[in-house]
Image (cartoon, helix red, strand yellow):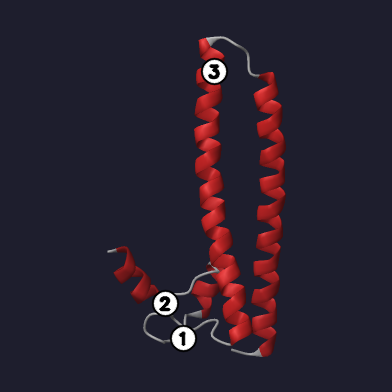
Amino acid sequence: MTRNQLDHYREVLEQQLTSIGETRNQQQEEFVEGRESVGTSSEDKATGLETMEVDSALADSEFQLEKKIRHALLRIEQGSYGICESCGAEIADERLKAKPSVSLCLPCQKKHEA
């Protein structure tokens, strides 16, 4: 992989990290505002709990993506970005363009999911 390609992927990954951080800050603000505005009725509490569950699931998903992005950035620094962590083959550029945080080639990803 060329230096220009690595720089491109680093920039994309760093932008994704920034976006996740901004989303997290916004969600925290909304959570605080939501807790302050929840009424005392059972219906209000149930709706509040349901919203908290959805928010928690989204936060967990974003946390997992953040971990993958940080791992990809580390792999760029180590010189192993774009190489499958399982078989050592080069990860297809199309796959990296679609999801720059991946660390497995498509065949290894399919095996991993099975």
Question: Are the residues flagged by discs 2 and 1 in contact, CB closer than 8 Å?
Answer: yes
Which residue is situated farthest in the top direction here?
41
x then y, percent, for residue 84:
44, 81
Residue 23 vs residue 97, the one in the foreground:
23
Secondary structure under the numbered disc 2 in the rendered image: loop
Quadrant of the image occupied by residue 33: top right
Closer mark to the observer between disc 3 and disc 2: 3
Pointer 2 residue: 105
Answer above or below: position of 80 versus 51. below
- Look at the image and tell me whether residue 100 can be seen: no
* Residue in the picture at 55% in, 63% down: 67
Percent coordinates x, y for residue 15 in the rendering: 70, 63
Q: Nearer the viewer, residue 95 or 47?
A: 47
The quarter of the picture where residue 52 lies is top right
State which quarter of the image contains the N terminus.
bottom right
Mark identifier at residue 45: 3
- Dot 1 alpha-carbon crowd within 10 angstroms: few under 14, some 14 to 19, many 20 or more: some
Q: Which residue is mark 1?
A: 90
| Label 3 environment density (alpha carbons within 10 Å; few <14, some 14–19, many ≥20) | some
Residue type at numbered disc 2: Cys
Picture coordinates of residue 5, whole percent (x, y): 65, 83
Q: CA distance from mark 1 to mark 3?
A: 51 Å
User: Label 2 vs label 1: CA separation?
Assistant: 7 Å
Label of residue 33 in the image: none
Determine the residue positioned at 56% across, 9% down. Answer: 41
